[in-house]
Image: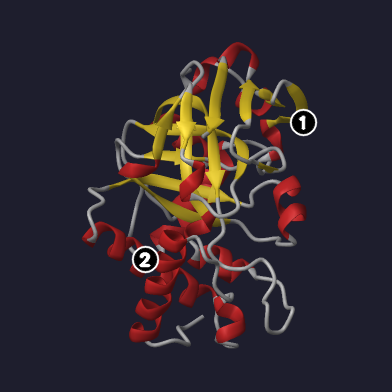
Amino acid sequence: MALSLTAETCRKIAAQLEQAEQTRQQIRPASCEYPGFNMDDAYAVQAEWIRLKLAGGRRTVKGYKIGLTSRAMQMSSNIDTPDSGVLLDDMFLYDGCDVPAGRLIMPRIEVELGFMLGRDLRGPGCTIFDVLDAADYVVPTLEIIDVRFCMTDPVTGAGRKVFDTIADNACNAFLVIGGTPVKPASIDLRWVGAIMYQNGVVQETGVSAGVLGHPANGIVWLANRIAGQGEYLKAGQFVMAGSFTRPLFAKPGDVFTVDYGRLGCVNCRFA
């Protein structure tokens, strides 16, 4: 698939996304503004937005997130294709933190596992064994997602598409790292379970096999996808493997605790 948009148009959409994030005012989905908008366009817009953020003061790319890898997430988004986004240094939060709700438009929270890479991971041909060998440790991680594009176009009534999600940096906003890091070989990662409490009430439960059968498979997908652009995952990068519960909406004052059993808990409050 080839780009349908010019580089100038991709930069224009990236600037609009940045403004939407700063003003907390959503914009029309790019797929509605540009009928030929495709996946290559979407990743080109995402790349332009990341360049804009780095030029604006973010220090470095610290990793990636993988989204829409579980059936639960695909059903909640009416999408059947995984996507990926970029993690920057200012997105990382830690157990017990206050999430700055005032910077977000429509925040939701997801339950994931994060992989810290100890060595480079390259495709094509990357396998689950390569991922497990490359990861130094796996740790419970919550993702805070947000949407800069409208979920439904105010002009046509059409819903956003997966291409819009990709351009929107896969809806990434923050991540919260907590729990107990484990070596990938020390536990069957398919059976990591989680119980999500919102203000003391159980709202979601899940098991990590919901992510493509094994959470490492999301990273396999990512390594092989970016290999087509001559890129690879680097030692020291952190990769979120994808959610295995539905996202929960969050509002100021909400407290979330996610219990991962033997992997410990992750806690945060929206302030």
Label 1 Cα crowd, 10 Å radius (few <14 / some 14-19 / many 20+): some
Residue 141 visible here: yes
Q: What residue is shown at x 65% (from left), y 14% (from top)?
A: 261
Residue type, mark 2 in image? Trp
Tell me if 155 is positioned left or right of 231 in this view. Answer: right
Up/down of 24 relative to 181, above or below: below
Where is residue 253, by image quadrant? top right
- Provide the secondary structure element on which disc 1 rests: strand
Whole-percent x, y for residue 257 in the image = 62, 23
- Residue marked by disc 1: 203
Q: Position of residue 244 (x, y in %)?
A: 68, 38
Question: Which residue is more in the foreground, 115 or 28?
Answer: 28
Measured in 3D between alpha carbons, the distance from the residue under mark 2 to the one under mark 1, in whole angstroms, is: 34 Å
Q: Residues within 10 Å of mark 2 (few under 14, many from 20)?
A: many
**Mark 2: secondary structure:** helix
* Residue drawn at x 49%, y 15% as measured from the top left: 180
In the rendered structure, are the residues bearing label 2 and label 1 in contact, judged by CB atoms less than 8 Å apart?
A: no
Residue ID for mark 2: 49
The kind of residue on which mark 1 rests is Gln
